[in-house]
Amino acid sequence: MKIVNIHEAKTHLSRLIAEAEAGEEIVLARGGKPVARLLRIAVPAQRRFGAMRGRARIDDAFFEPLPESELAAWE
């Protein structure tokens, strides 16, 4: 954890962001008292097309028409 005064942070913001991207936690301080943290954001993983291939199966019954009683329940 690195503590940086706000004036220095304004002067070196690009460098501090690069350090945060690298995983370092930076604490911004005013008058030596911590007021904020600069952290890297955890980016969610991209979804991959076809990731469920082979895990789910659909048989021919899936494509058969629904019985009248069930169709009525949906209306």
Image (tube, rainbow, N blue to C red):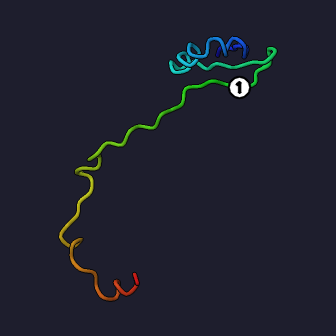
Residue found at x 59% / y 15%: 16
Residue depicted at x 24% and y 71%:
62
In the shown orientation, is residue 23 left or right of residue 34?
left
In the shown orientation, is residue 68 left or right of residue 12? left
Q: Quadrant of residue 12?
A: top right
| Residue 41 percent across, percent down from the top left | 54, 30
**Location of residue 57 in the rendering, given as x and y in whole percent from the top left corner:** 23, 60
Screen quadrant of the N terminus: top right
Given residues 15 and 37, the one toward you in this image is 15
Q: Residue at x 24, y 50 (%)?
A: 53
Picture quadrant where residue 59 is located: bottom left
In the displayed structure, 68 sits above or below 46; it is: below
Picture coordinates of residue 6, whole percent (x, y): 72, 16
Quarter the C terminus occupies: bottom left
Rendered position, 70 above or below 53: below
- Quarter of the image where one finds residue 8: top right
Task: List the single residue furthest toward the front.
Answer: 11
Secondary structure beneath dot 1 equals strand
Give the residue type at disc 1: Ala
Circle 1 sits on which residue?
36
Question: Which residue is drawn at the image coordinates 26% and 52% (left, top)?
Answer: 55
- Callout 1 environment at 10 Å: few (<14), some (14 to 19), or many (20+)? few
**Residue 44 percent location from the top left of the image:** 45, 37
Question: Farthest residue toward the left?
Answer: 60
> How many labels, in total?
1
Q: Is residue 71 left or right of residue 36?
A: left
